[in-house]
Amino acid sequence: MANERKNSTRETKRRHTRAKPDVKVYYTHAMLLYGTKKEKEEQEQILQRFPNCALVNPSKLERPEDDGMEFYKNILARCDSLVFSRLVGRVTAGVGIEIKHALSLGKPVYELRSAKLFRVKKPVKHLSREETRELFELLHYDGLQPNDS
């Protein structure tokens, strides 16, 4: 009877241990993708690679208006790794800043491309804020959908 209780307690501890996220993964992507089908698909792809992770999605966070990128950098600092995606083949300004920050902290960085993750060890070329705004305007003007990227 005592052995049964010990085994039961061990199994309960194992189940609870497995339920805890192994890592926190910060998912950075263009704001134009926030709330889209593409965003949901990318999240699912990340969760396939990191099935027991806590996925931190900046589109779900409310940041103070006057804090700029510092809010996101502080959240990123508490994560274990970063996964990013491109918008029509380009890295937008905020995503580029977050990639550079994660690398400076020594965190693993991965690019999500074609439903696969590729390790990135150096900062990537990214658009400026102005170029990012122009791209967003162009995509809206041309009627392109983020899901097409």
Image (cartoon, rainbow, N blue to C red):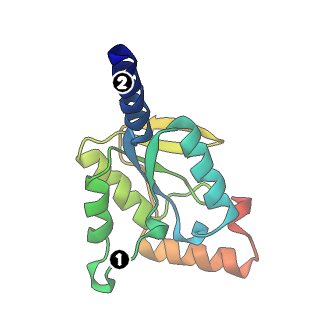
In x, y percent, where is residue 17? 37, 34
Q: Amino acid at mark 2?
A: Arg
Quadrant for the C terminus, please: bottom right
Residue at the image position 66 percent from the left and 42 percent from the top:
114
Please say if the residues under marks 2 and 1 sit with CB atoms less than 8 Å apart: no
How crowded is the residue under tag 1: few (<14 C-alpha within 10 Å), some, or many (20+)?
A: some
Q: Which mark is residue 63?
A: 1
What kind of element bears circle 2?
Answer: helix
Q: Which mark is residue 115?
A: none
Residue at the image position 57 percent from the left and 69 percent from the top:
34
Q: Is residue 102 above or below residue 106?
A: below
User: Is 78 displayed left or right of 5 in the figure?
Assistant: left
In x, y percent, where is residue 52? 47, 39
Query: Which residue extends farthest front?
Result: 1
Estimate the spatial distance between the alpha carbons at disc 2 and disc 1, rounded to whole Å: 41 Å
Quadrant for the N terminus, please: top left
2 vs 1, front mark: 2
Task: Pick the residue in front: 66 or 125.
Answer: 66
Residue at the image position 44 percent from the left and 40 percent from the top:
19
**Mark 2 or mark 1, which has the lower sequence index?**
2
Task: Pick the residue in front: 42 or 52.
Answer: 52
Q: Is residue 32 above or below residue 9?
A: below
Q: Amino acid at mark 1?
A: Arg
What kind of element bears circle 1?
Answer: loop
Task: Pick the residue in front: 59 or 91.
Answer: 59
How crowded is the residue under tag 2: few (<14 C-alpha within 10 Å), some, or many (20+)?
A: few
In x, y percent, where is residue 8? 41, 25
Residue 98 falls in image quadrant:
bottom left
Residue at the image position 75 percent from the left and 77 percent from the top:
142
Would you name the residue on which mark 2 appears? 10
